[in-house]
Amino acid sequence: MEILRNRLIELRHKKGLLQRDVADALHVERCTYSYYERGKTNPPLDILIKLADYFGVTTDYLLGREG
C-alpha cells in the first residue's frame, strides 16, 4: 500500500526517528519494519494498531481512510 508506506516514512521523519527506533518499540526486527516502509509487505493487524498508537494517529489515517 503506497499510502501506508508514505505515512510511515513521513511520521517517522517528523519524529526524527530511525527505523531501528520504531522496530524496537514494536518488538520487530529492523528489516521487518523496513519492509513495511518499502511496501514489500503489509503489517499484520496487531502491528498496524501498535503503529497507530506509537505515532498517535488512527489506523484509518495510516491506511488513507481519514474521510
Image (tube, grey):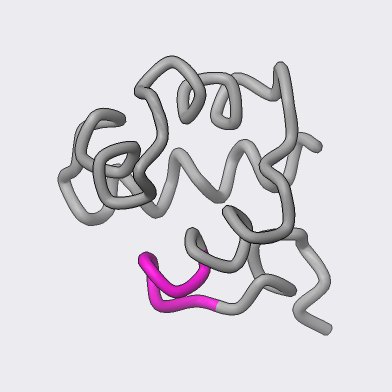
What residue sits 44% from the left and 74% below the top?
53
Q: Check the image and name the residue furthest to the bottom.
A: 67
Q: Is residue 8 magenta?
A: no
Write the residue at 83% across / 84% down: 67
Instruction: Give the side of residue 14 with respect to residue 54, left or right.
Output: left
Report the magenta stretch's main SS. Answer: helix
Q: How many marks?
A: 0
Residue 49 horizontal/vertical position (percent): 59, 67
Q: Is residue 36 above or below residue 59?
A: above
Which residues are the magenta region?
52-57
Q: Nearer the viewer, residue 51 or 13?
A: 51
Looking at the picture, does residue 56 appear above or below residue 39?
below
Tell me: 51 left or right of 21: right
Query: What quarter of the picture does the N terminus occupy?
Result: top right
Name which residue lies at 47% across and 21% down.
Answer: 34
Residue 35 percent coordinates (x, y): 58, 20
Percent of width and height locating residue 20: 24, 29
Q: Residue 38 vs residue 41: left or right? A: left
Rendered residue at 50%/76% (across/down): 57
Residue closest to the far left? 16
Q: Is residue 17 left or right of residue 37?
A: left
